[in-house]
Image (cartoon, rainbow, N blue to C red):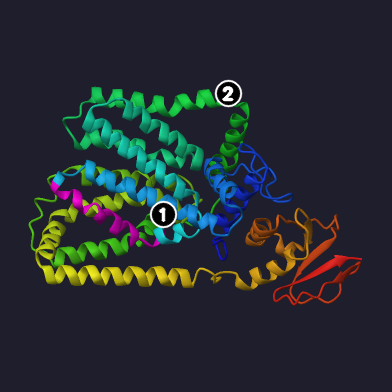
């Protein structure tokens, strides 16, 4: 559900829903009449994909949640394939291991419930690595081109930050001496061809795409480097990465403590070095800007989970074999897991209709949109103008815009708190908790 969603994800859901209803276009997205009537803060692909779900299933508040969950399911499938393509056959059945390390990372569950653009981008960045691995394993150049193409889609989702998987071209050359510089040049050429050529076709066939992406570049890329600051130090993102990896580090430590297997078997593959290098390539470039947020590193997290998994794969193999051969232990573990799954599923259903964030605000908004017609604009006070969630909720659920301009008095005006008189307006008795709504006389 959208109730209580993080501000960014809420606005993205509103934009996608608007697009499905014909408000705005793919290359000129629309949030509201007063806030981002021309939205170019991000490339449009994720909004376009999500709008298709609104087209198919209506305006249900579960659409954006379902979309996010589907993104993680698809990404999980890709990560499992990456594991199998980079491991001997005997380790294939441990494809759940990187998924375990991934799912215990706090940012993963948070992003899955908050409709972040990185959820979609993670599909394309992970898929690009899978295509690279298939190109190497199967010696088929087409996969290098496909690697570049899905990164083109990643760029249309989140911009330049989606291009970090290209670094695997360098890391594989460094950590696999058999991969020559001649092969590096060829693979780089084909990958860049798959990435850049679609832009030429896009700009030639759809000139408005060039204008849209140009506006994105000026606002987000140039703006974030030159003028926008959200953290005090460029190293903040590294500290955030460490915090997110703490559960994985703890689990890794437990495997080391309770296992007696030699380390040599786990370090025979160079893939664990390649994956941590790719993961860091998705984090360190963020330090260029002082505009940083924790969810920026989401798409890099699968590669840290793969790194952890390679370190302990032999240990986990021995543990799982012992459990499999011990019928009693296996049955107990199976039924315990089954019970935990059903309890978790039941709790999700039970809390599905509860509002965890902004519940007072939402209760008021539902009462207001029952009175104010769709596509209306409500005047608001300056103190409410920067309440982005308020803008998002009104647009997502009521197609209502909020206008802080004092020069225009719309038919309705919303003020913060319990006000009883407003010149030229009559207060509506809606029993609101946080606001007061007035209608023009």
What percent of the width, then of the height, locates residue 337?
27, 68
Assess disc 1: are there few (<14), some (14-19) or many (≥20) residues with their C-alpha within 10 Å of its C-alpha. many
Q: Nearer the viewer, residue 240 or 60?
A: 60
Q: Nearer the viewer, mark 2 or mark 1?
A: 2
Query: Which residues make up the magenta segment?
Result: 90-107
The reply to whether residue 343 is visible in this rendering is: yes
Number of numbered discs present? Answer: 2
Does dot 1 land on a helix, a strand or a loop?
helix
Q: Is residue 57 magenta?
A: no
Q: Is residue 92 magenta?
A: yes
Looking at the rendered image, the quarter that the C terminus falls into is: bottom right
Does dot 2 land on a helix, a strand or a loop?
helix
Residue drawn at the location 29% of the way across and 23% of the way down: 186
Mark 2 or mark 1: whose residue is earlier in sequence: 2
Q: Which residue is mark 1?
A: 237
Is 326 situated left or right of 306 in this image?
left
Residue drawn at the location 74% of the way across and 51% of the way down: 34
| C-alpha span from label 2 to label 1 | 39 Å
Mark drawn on residue 205: 2
């Amino acid at each position: 559900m959208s109730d209580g969603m993080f501000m960014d994800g809420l606005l993205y859901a509103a934009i996608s829903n608007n697009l499905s209803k014909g408000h705005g276009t793919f290359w000129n997205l629309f949030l509201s009449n007063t806030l981002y009537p021309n939205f170019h803060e991000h490339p449009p692909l994720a909004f376009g994909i999500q709008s298709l779900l609104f087209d198919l299933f209506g305006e249900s508040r579960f659409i954006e949640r379902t979309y996010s969950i589907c993104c993680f399911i698809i990404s999980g499938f890709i990560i499992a394939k990456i594991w199998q393509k980079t491991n001997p056959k005997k380790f294939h059945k441990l494809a759940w291991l990187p998924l375990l390390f991934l799912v215990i990372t706090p940012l993963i569950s948070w992003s899955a419930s908050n409709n972040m653009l990185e959820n979609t981008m993670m599909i394309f960045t992970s898929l690009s690595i899978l295509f690279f691995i298939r190109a190497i394993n199967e010696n088929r150049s087409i996969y290098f081109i496909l690697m570049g193409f899905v990164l083109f889609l990643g760029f249309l989702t989140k911009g330049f930050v989606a291009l970090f998987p290209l670094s695997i071209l360098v890391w594989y050359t460094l950590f696999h001496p058999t991969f020559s510089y001649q092969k590096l040049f060829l693979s780089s050429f084909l990958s860049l061809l798959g990435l850049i050529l679609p832009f030429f076709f896009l700009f030639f066939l759809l000139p408005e795409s060039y204008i849209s992406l140009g506006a994105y570049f000026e606002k987000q890329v140039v703006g974030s480097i030159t003028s926008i600051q959200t953290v005090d130090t460029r190293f903040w993102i590294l500290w955030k990465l460490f915090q997110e990896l703490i559960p994985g580090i703890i689990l890794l430590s437990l495997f080391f403590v309770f296992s007696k297997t030699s380390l040599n078997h786990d370090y025979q593959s160079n893939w664990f070095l390649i994956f941590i290098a790719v993961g860091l390539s998705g984090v360190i470039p963020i330090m260029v800007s002082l505009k940083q947020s924790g969810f920026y590193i989401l798409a890099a997290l699968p590669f840290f989970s793969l790194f952890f998994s390679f370190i302990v794969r032999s240990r986990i193999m021995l543990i799982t074999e012992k459990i499999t051969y011990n019928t009693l232990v296996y049955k107990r573990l199976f039924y315990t897991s089954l019970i935990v799954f059903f309890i978790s599923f039941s709790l999700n259903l039970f809390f599905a209709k509860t509002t965890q964030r902004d519940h007072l605000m939402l209760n008021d908004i539902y009462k207001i949109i029952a009175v104010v017609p769709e596509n209306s604009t409500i005047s608001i006070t300056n103190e409410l103008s920067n309440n982005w969630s308020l803008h998002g909720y009104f647009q997502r659920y009521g197609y209502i815009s909020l206008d802080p301009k004092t020069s225009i008095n719309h038919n309705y005006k919303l003020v913060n708190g319990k006000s009883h008189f407003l010149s030229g307006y009559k207060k509506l008795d809606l029993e609101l908790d946080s606001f007061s709504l007035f209608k023009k006389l």
